[in-house]
Every structure is written in C-alpha cells, then in structure tokens.
Amino acid sequence: MRIRGVWMFWTAAFLLASLGWAQAADPVALARQAVEAWRAGELTPKLDLRALEGKSPEEVADWLRKTFAFPPPPPGLEVNLDEPEVEETPTGTQVRFPAVSGPDGGEVVVTVSDGQVQRIAWRPSGGLLPPWVKSDAARLVFAAVSLLLLFHLFGGGVARLWRSAWALLGRYRKLYLFTNLLLYGLFVLGAALAYGLPDLARAMQEAVGGAIETIGLDTGAQKGVSGLAWTIFYWNFTHGLLLTSFLPAFFLGVPALLVNAARYYVFGFALSPAVIPWDVYVWHLPTLVIELQAYILVTFGGLVLLVETLKGRGFRAGLQLLGLTLLLGTLFLIAGAWYEAFELLYLLR
C-alpha cells in the first residue's frame, strides 16, 4: 500500500508538471495571460527618466525595449480573448485577438518567441493608412505614373525639370555638399556608435520594426511589388518628405535641418550593421541611400530659401527653388520605393 501511495503521488505530480509545462509552452495561453497583465498596466514601464540615472547601458536598453514592446493600451480597449488567430512568422508566433477601442475596430497582436512574450501591440483595422491607399486603383495609378515619369525622364517636361533642379544644385554646390556630408555623416556616426551599444541599438531597431507594423505597410505586400511600393511611397512622401521636411523648411530651412539631423542619427543607430546581418544590410543599403537623399534635397532647399532671403532676393524666389527640390526628392522616393519593395519581397527571402 505504501509503495502504491508513493507511486500515485509521483504520477500525479508528473501529470501536474506536464500540464503546467504544456500550458506555459502554449503561445495562446501565454498571449492571453500577457494581454490581461498588459491591460492592467503591469507590463508597461513607468515613464520616469529620473529612475534611469546611474543605470548601465544594458539596463537602459532593457527599459527602452520594454517601453517600445509594451506601449500603453488605448483607452477603453476591449479584447476578445476567446477567438485567437495564430500565425507563425520569422520573428516568432503571432497571436491575434479581435479588439475594439471606442469606435475603432482592430486587433491586439502578441508576439511569442522561445516561450516568452516579446511584444504586444494594438493595431487598428488597416493600420494608419487611409482606406483609399489600400485600393487596387491607387496602386495601379502609382504604377502608371511611375512608368510615365521613367519614360519622360529622358525627354519632355520631366527632363527639363530634372535639369533645372540639378542646375540649382550646381549653383549652390558647396551648400549641397555641406548638407550631404552633415546628414549622411550623422547616419554613419549613429551606425558606428551602435557597435559600442548593441543592446540599446537592438531596442531602437525593435521600436522601428514595431512602428512599421503599426502603420500597416505590410498590407501593401499582399498585393505584390506595386502594392508595397505604393504604400511605402505614400508614407515616406506624406510623413517623411512633406510633414517633417518640406513644411519645416518653410521656416527658413533650419527646422528641417534639425529634424533630419535627429532622424539620420537615430536611423543610423537603429539600422546599423551592428544589429543587422551584413548579408541583409548590403541589400538594404541602396534603399537607405536613395530615400535619405530625398530628405537631404528638401533640407538643402530649405537652406537655399534661407540664403536667398538673407541676400535680399526675396522669399518668393527662394520658395520656387524649394519647390524644385521637393519635386526632385519625390522622384528619389518613387525610385527608392520600387527598389525597397522588390528588396523586401525577393532579395531578402
């Protein structure tokens, strides 16, 4: 009887341990527990910069990683934990739960890797892209316009515009060279410093990746190269070239220079080969050079506006020159979007 009792005890203990292990290894169970803790505010670090004083770079990187990986949930978020959708991705298992935040529908996405929850994100339906951007008509128009620009680049109005814009760069050759050296230099500096702070750079890289997922650029990939190229161009043009480069350039160029100086340093740090394999970085480098040149051109145009105004030639004359750099930067963004879409769908597979 005693031996039988001991056997039953260890059998029960083994079954309980197995059950607990199976539940812990189940990504859906882990995702459910993490979402509940996230909604209760248990996963998002408190924004108290004073608490980081005296911390090591590794501790600061861990704090940043958790901050970006577990941002605060939107107000009034309701999550349906009973209808999960599971998908295997290169970064781990993604578990999606239908969710609602006020009038906005969407989903909460939990990334599980190596038995641990790596990231939780709220994604409104379609991301941050307007519905019309994701239509077939929009991507087909973009493809047609791209082909027309390519055809007329060697003759006609586009060619004359191209020559006028580059003649402008020739007139202000030293200023253009200064802008390139400064901004590309900050990018290279950020990439170099990432070798000394790889954990912090990796945390920044995860933040950039999470932002891309939230925007919803991956929805364009479902429609092939043209769909992905269009969504990349739309976001880079509206939020990169117009809102954070061209509009600040109106204020005599200096705000645009400051914004892009910070942008290039952060991009260099987060997209450094210190945290990206070289076989991936080599393919992505043309994307960085082409697209960042677009922002350099508009920043340069803002500085030309400053010079023209200070020399007494008038704000309007400088504004015309700024407009030329905007058009030239748009052409660079179109070219960069097509290459990046092809790169992501084929070269990095």
Image (tube, rainbow, N blue to C red):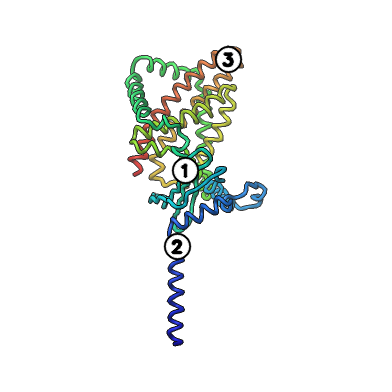
Q: Give the labeled residue for mark 3.
A: 315
- Mark 3 belongs to which amino acid? Phe
User: Measured from the top left, where is residue 144 in percent x and y?
Assistant: 33, 24
Q: Secondary structure at mark 1?
A: helix
Mark 3 or mark 1, which is nearer to you? 1
Q: Give the labeled residue for mark 2.
A: 23
User: Measured from the top left, where is residue 22 in percent x and y?
Assistant: 43, 64
In the displayed structure, does residue 181 sit left or right of residue 310?
Answer: left
Q: How many marks?
A: 3
Position of the N terminus, as image quadrant, is: bottom left
Mark 2 or mark 3, which is nearer to you? 2
- Marking on residue 149: none
Instruction: Confirm whether residue 212 shows in the render.
Output: yes
Instruction: Confirm whether residue 270 shows in the render.
Output: no
Q: Secondary structure at mark 3?
A: helix
89 vs 154: above or below: below
In the displayed structure, does residue 315 sit left or right of residue 141?
Answer: right
Q: Residue at x 34, y 16 (%)?
A: 155
Residue extending farthest to the bottom is 1
Disc 3 versus disc 1: distance between alpha carbons? 40 Å
Mark closer to the chain start, 3 or 1: 1
User: Measured from the top left, where is residue 86 in percent x and y?
Assistant: 40, 51
Disc 2 versus disc 3: distance between alpha carbons? 67 Å
Between 222 and 253, the residue placed more toward the observer is 222
- Marking on residue 209: 1
